[in-house]
């Protein structure tokens, strides 16, 4: 499931409205880098929904950015930068962006994408080690664009895209809104982006995530690595690791279990949306 469907195998659904599945339906619920996009007060109802749709004994597996790891690294690089370590200064710049940008950004990709689009990234290996495939794809895309020998073809393609974009209904709607709203249009644009689902609304560490899972009725909440799981045949699903490469290396991975003999609280739609 996702906000928008990217293929026939993805169900388009707003999970703030609950999970559109019956009670006790699944053996496993898995979500990666999703929970941090929920406002803090909406996280508990969503985790209770995960509990509801799991069969007794079922497993929930969650991957989120690791606040504890980021905080430790920030303090470490800050201390080294203060003592004149030039590479630590670059690492400090990135970890500060990593901590804040995904929460405060007002445009797609934010400062993280802009940083990766520099001609020279002095701490590139450090960033790719931390952020994995997403950072690697942004960096490679930028380098491929810079290294293209078909500039004229690329320019024509860009012009064609601009024309198509201008003729698109949403673009025309934005143009009309800009004319009528004037300076207020930026408020609309920023507000629309902030509600689009991209920004992070909260962060978790191993203590707060385990506490949330326990509060919602799960038991045995414990941290895992990307490679280990209590889910049978975990490696064959290639969700956190593919071809030996971890998708989001510095994530916090945690699993918990639905109790075998405890009743699951049923949430009404009104409760979920409250």
Image (cartoon, helix red, strand yellow):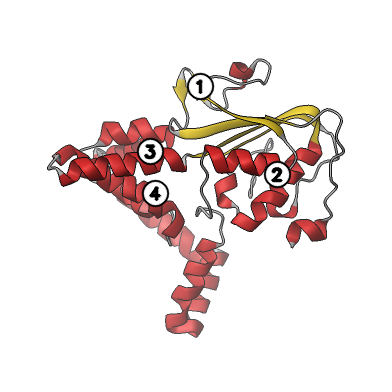
How far apart are labels 3 and 1 at the CA level?
Answer: 16 Å
The answer to which of marks 3 and 4 sits earlier in the sequence is: 4
Question: Where's the C terminus, which quadrant?
Answer: bottom right
The answer to which of marks 1 and 2 sits earlier in the sequence is: 2
How far apart are labels 1 and 2 at the CA level?
Answer: 33 Å
Q: What element carries label 2?
A: helix
Circle 1 crowding by C-alpha within 10 Å: few under 14, some 14–19, many from 20: few
Q: Residue at x 47, y 30 (%)?
A: 247
Q: How many labels does the image show?
A: 4
Give coordinates of residue 188: x percent, y percent: 51, 73
Is 70 drawn above or below residue 231 in the view shown?
Answer: below
**Snapshot quadrant of residue 83:** top left
The answer to which of marks 3 and 1 sits earlier in the sequence is: 3
The single residue placed furthest to the left in the displayed view is 84
Name the disc covering residue 135, or none. 3
Name the disc covering residue 242, or none. 1
How far apart are labels 4 and 1 at the CA level?
Answer: 26 Å
Front residue of 132 and 60: 60
Residue pointed to by mark 2: 215
Name the disc covering residue 203, or none. none
- Relative to residue 195, is residue 15 drawn left or right? right
The answer to which of marks 4 and 1 sits earlier in the sequence is: 4
Residue pointed to by mark 4: 99
Give coordinates of residue 33: x percent, y percent: 54, 41
């Amino acid at each position: 499931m996702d906000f928008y469907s990217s293929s026939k195998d993805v169900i388009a659904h707003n999970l703030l409205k609950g999970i559109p599945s019956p009670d006790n339906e699944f053996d496993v619920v898995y979500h990666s880098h999703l929970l941090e996009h929920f406002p803090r007060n909406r996280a508990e109802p969503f985790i209770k929904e995960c509990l509801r749709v799991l069969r007794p004994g079922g497993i929930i597996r969650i991957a989120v950015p690791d606040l504890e790891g980021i905080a430790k690294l920030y303090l470490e690089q800050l201390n080294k930068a203060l003592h004149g370590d030039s590479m630590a200064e670059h690492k400090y710049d990135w970890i500060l962006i990593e901590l804040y940008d995904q929460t405060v950004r007002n445009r797609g990709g934010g400062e993280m994408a802009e940083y990766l689009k520099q001609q020279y990234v002095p701490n590139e290996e450090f960033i790719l080690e931390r952020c994995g495939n997403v950072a690697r794809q942004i960096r490679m895309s930028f380098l491929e664009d810079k290294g293209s020998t078909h500039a004229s073809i690329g320019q024509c393609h860009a012009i064609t895209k601009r024309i198509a974009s201008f003729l698109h209904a949403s673009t025309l709607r934005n143009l009309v809104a800009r004319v009528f709203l004037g300076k207020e249009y930026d408020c609309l644009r920023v507000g629309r982006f902030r509600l689009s689902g991209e920004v992070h609304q909260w962060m978790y560490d191993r203590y707060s995530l385990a506490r949330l899972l326990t509060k919602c009725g799960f038991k045995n909440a414990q941290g895992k690595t990307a490679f280990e799981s209590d889910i049978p045949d975990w490696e064959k699903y290639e969700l956190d690791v593919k071809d030996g490469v971890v998708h989001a290396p510095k994530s916090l991975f945690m699993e918990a279990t639905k109790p075998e003999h405890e009743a699951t609280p049923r949430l009404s739609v009104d409760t979920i949306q409250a």
